[in-house]
Image (cartoon, rainbow, N blue to C red):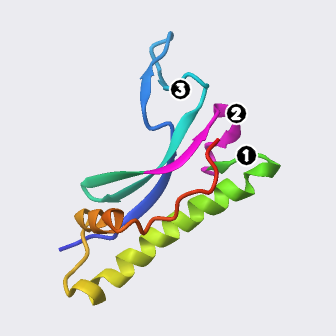
């Protein structure tokens, strides 16, 4: 029995222990961390890179979106990528004649069907 597949946008999936012992986002040498899409179907989780890297001040953790006026392109790109993943999930049973599972996203990744952002910052 397959459960519903859920999608979540995560900023800075990689964390390290900070000075005060709490977990903090690990930043690259430019002071940015990547944004990934977490896909989970209990208990299995899959992480897909969006190709977007942001500074902590550019990310709104409460709304799970990019802050600021120039963020429209990045937020649109994130929504398009999730929509492409959901579309593949919904079309899969008709195309392949079997129920969809998380491992089937590998087929999509090999077919280069994910929409990549136009610019890298």
User: Which mark is on residue 57?
Assistant: 2
Q: Give whichever of 95, 5 is nearer the camera.
A: 95
Residue 2 as seen in the image, left or right of residue 63: left
Q: For the C terminus, which image quadrant? A: top right
Residue 60 lies within the magenta run: yes
Question: Which residue has dot 3 on it?
Answer: 27
Dots 1, 2 in contact, CB < 8 A: yes
Residue 5 as seen in the image, left or right of residue 55: left
Q: Is mark 3 on a helix, strand or loop?
A: loop
The structure residue drawn at horizontal position 36% and vertical position 84%, both measured from the top left corner, is 91
| Disc 1 packing (10 Å; few <14; some 14–19; many ≥20) | some
Mark sitting earlier along the chain (3/2)? 3
Residue 74 as seen in the image, left or right of residue 21: right
| Disc 3 packing (10 Å; few <14; some 14–19; many ≥20) | some
Mark sitting earlier along the chain (3/1)? 3
| Disc 2 packing (10 Å; few <14; some 14–19; many ≥20) | few
Give how far across and how far down residue 82 sits, in percent: 50, 65
Magenta-highlighted residues: 49-64
Give how far across and how far down residue 50 sits, in percent: 50, 52
**Distance Cα–Cα, label 3 vs label 2:** 12 Å
**Distance Cα–Cα, label 1 vs label 2:** 8 Å
Give how far across and how far down residue 109 sits, in percent: 35, 62
The structure residue drawn at horizontal position 23% and vertical position 63%, both measured from the top left corner, is 103
Residue 65 lies within the magenta run: no
The structure residue drawn at horizontal position 61% and vertical position 25%, both measured from the top left corner, is 31
Q: Give whichever of 19, 119 is nearer the camera.
A: 119
Question: Which residue has dot 1 on it?
Answer: 67
Residue projecting furthest to the right: 69
């Amino acid at each position: 029995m397959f459960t519903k597949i859920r999608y979540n946008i995560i900023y800075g999936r990689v964390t390290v222990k900070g000075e005060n012992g709490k977990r903090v986002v690990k930043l690259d040498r430019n002071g940015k961390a990547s944004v990934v899409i977490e896909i989970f179907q209990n208990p299995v989780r899959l992480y897909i890179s969006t190709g977007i890297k942001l500074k902590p001040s550019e990310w709104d953790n409460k709304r799970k979106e990019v802050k600021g006026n120039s963020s429209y392109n990045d937020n649109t790109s994130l929504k398009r990528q999730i929509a492409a993943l959901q579309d593949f999930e919904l079309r899969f049973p008709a195309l392949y004649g079997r129920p969809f599972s998380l491992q089937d996203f590998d087929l999509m990744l090999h077919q280069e069907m994910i929409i990549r952002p136009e610019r890298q910052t």
